[in-house]
Amino acid sequence: MAVVHNLAAARGVPPAPVATLRGVTRVYDGERRVEALGPIDLDLAEGEFFAVVGPSGCGKSTLLDVLSGLSRPTSGSITFEGRPVEGEVPDGVGVVFQEDASFAWLTVRDNVAFGLRRAGVDAAEIARRVDYAVGFMGLADFAAAYPAQLSGGMRQRVCIARTLVMRPRLILLDEPFGALDQQTRLLMGDELLRLWRETGATVLLITHALDEAAMLSDRVGVMSARPGRFIDLVETGWPRDRDSRIVSESRFGALTGRLWSNLREESLRAMGSKGAAA
Amino acid sequence: MSAALSADVRPARKPREGAFDGVIILVVVLALWQGVHLYAGESAIASPLATLTFLAEFLRTPVFWGHFGATMAAFGYAVAISSVLGVVLGLVLGVRRFAGDVAEPILAGLYSIPKVTLYPMILLIFGLGMSAKVAFGVIHGVVPIVLFTMNAVKNVSPVLLRTARAMRLSQPETIRTVLAPAVLPEMITGLRVGFSLTLLGVLIGEMFASQRGLGFLIVNGINLHNVRMTTGMIVAVIAFALIANGLLLSLDRRFGRTPGGGSRAA
Amino acid sequence: MTRNRAIVLARIGVVAGAVVLVEVLCRLGVINPLTLVAPSRMVFDLAGILASGDINRDIAYTATTIATALVLSVVLGIVLGVAVHALPRVRRALDPLLASYYSVPSFIFYPLFVAIFGLNTFPLIVLGMAFAVPAMMMSTMAGLDRIPRVLLKTARVHRLNRWETATRIVLPSATPYLFTGLKLAIAYAFIGVIAGEFIMASAGLGHSIAFAYEGFDNHTMYALMLFVLVVVTVMNMSLHAWEGRLMRRRIRA
């Protein structure tokens, strides 16, 4: 994966990346051995918005699991802020999952405050941060509601707010908008961009939507079919101050086209129809 | 993808393992039984060996078959009445939504009251004998059958019926190819639950007031200090219940494979 | 809203109509008083019995027995459910046993329990537990099975330890299932204990009903039956209402 280093060098990335992956693989051992991931080499620059696209089943979620410390890589090493990540989620890393992870038994406010209360932050500070996050995610009118009373999109906002209040320096999102309709996705994308700009956090977004990746990120990593490896890294070159309206720019079409031309063959392989790829 | 993976990786249950488990459980149960026998003594519970020798002999006598026949006759009538009544009522209440909504909480209330309390009333109405046992079996068994059947009909997805209309199936065709297969799994589950409760009702009836049947033999064994009889008849009832339930479970599995045809216990 | 109201009214009408019908038939002598006494008479008799205090000891006896059986069943059921859930191998072996457990009428064990423990409250408690423990156990396992995996991942992201994960994620997540188990356990404890008292006992409500039956004392018998049915129904309805309130916020739109 020499390409990665060259690309990174060409961009003039700061010398110390926030997170690094070196030769990371993940193999599931069972009745049948499944090579799910890798080897992967990747540097995430501080404040970067990085998107990962790939055919279904290529190990995108596995990548997130090992990077966040939720599972250990079979081989290779991962660091976050210079310290190795080993089987535990490091402080400063926030994760938003694809599935609805809101706690049905807590109100929106209590959901958002969950992590802070555990961390022993004092009450006034909790109230301040929760108010801000709830307002920021447009949940102010629903602070006392239970998740069951909210739409799927709003529940996902609760989860994002719950992550946001912890002030993570690295936010990992696993297809967070996967279950939402297209219009809601675009608007949620805008909010994610706003959040990214205001917090200055590094973001890694896993998605299967090529337009989402092209619109939101600074850099897109295209993964191969299983075992997932990066086969292309695409710089989008968007200004930091951007929103979903860039979908009308001609370069957006070209970017999405490039992602798809890379991905088409891999997707066909993932579908199991290798012959059709030619 | 993790779900697909775990499905790939998880080893399938082998039939050999199942048989092995069965043997282990049997051994554990027999050991427990022997343990209780040793702890409580000969006058409280017979040992496995003594019970089995007793059974081997008693099962060859016409006395046993007389009582067994009495229980089976009551049980058979009760099951037949519960099933027919339950399925018909369930279908009607499922189709007539309003009546169904009116009836459901009443039925659920009837389901969870201790119906034993009502047995003296049944006895006063039907008199001591076969018909009281049958009636008591029916009031235990009919309610779950109604409830399961009604819910099965109510839960038939409207999209299935719209599909049938889109394919221009005639009404009999719709019933035969869409409705019946959609309703059947839950109905069979209801019948299984109703079947168990009917047996329970008949046996309680026999234990409380009766001169015939396996339930009577169990209580009579205690009153006459014939512990082998009590233990043996308990084993006989368990064996019958398990065999019958096993048959119904296999039916449940064959027809219950469709979504919504859950086979939850109790 | 109007349909819901119509349903409730119709339901009240059906129940009230049935009671009135029985009342009229009894008053007209169509139903023999040796078979069934009029509902109004049952209420009158029950009021008399309760006012006299004759039955208080039996009520207290039965209530204590049921409560003991219930508490033990819930605790044991949850403990066993958690333990078996944690041991998949044991669980696979027990599965067929649990699936057919309720097909065996557990009452048949009652005479044995009496023979082993003597004719006191102990066999009744054991019988109540024989009914209620497996229900609580299976509900517990169902609740644990259905905890979304993403919530357990979220717990790890928040770096909760095992105890915190159990109390803050697993327990609240499984609550609806535990509640179902509790409801079943209550119904089963009632059925088990009262049926046991009915068949063989020296005290308790079930015993009093059986005793009145054998003494041809229909007035006492029906009054006590009414008492048991009213208590159980009121309890079921309040549990149902409580569950509805608890679950309203949990049911996804």
Image: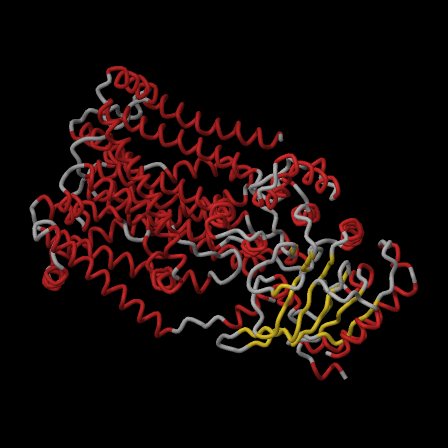
Q: Say which quarter of the image contains residue B161.
A: bottom right
If the image is split into quadrants, where does the C terminus of chain A sit? bottom right
Q: Residue at x 40, y 41 (%)?
A: C182
Q: Nearer the viewer, residue A153 or C17?
A: A153
The extreme right residue here reads A250
Q: Nearer the viewer, residue A250 or C249?
A: A250
Where does the image place residue A27, in percent across and percent down from the top left?
Answer: 57, 75
Q: Is residue B211 visible?
A: no
Give the percent coordinates (x, y) of residue C84.
37, 57
Looking at the image, residue C221 lies above or below residue B143: above
Residue B73 lies left or right of residue B177; in this view the side is: left
Image quadrant where residue A205 sits: bottom right
Number of labels in the image equals 0
Left or right, B231 with respect to C181, comes to left
Q: With C175 as the anchor, is A205 left or right in this view?
A: right
Q: Quadrant of residue C219?
A: top left
| Residue situated in front as seen by the camera: B128 or A27 | A27
Q: Residue at x 61, y 65 (%)?
A: A84
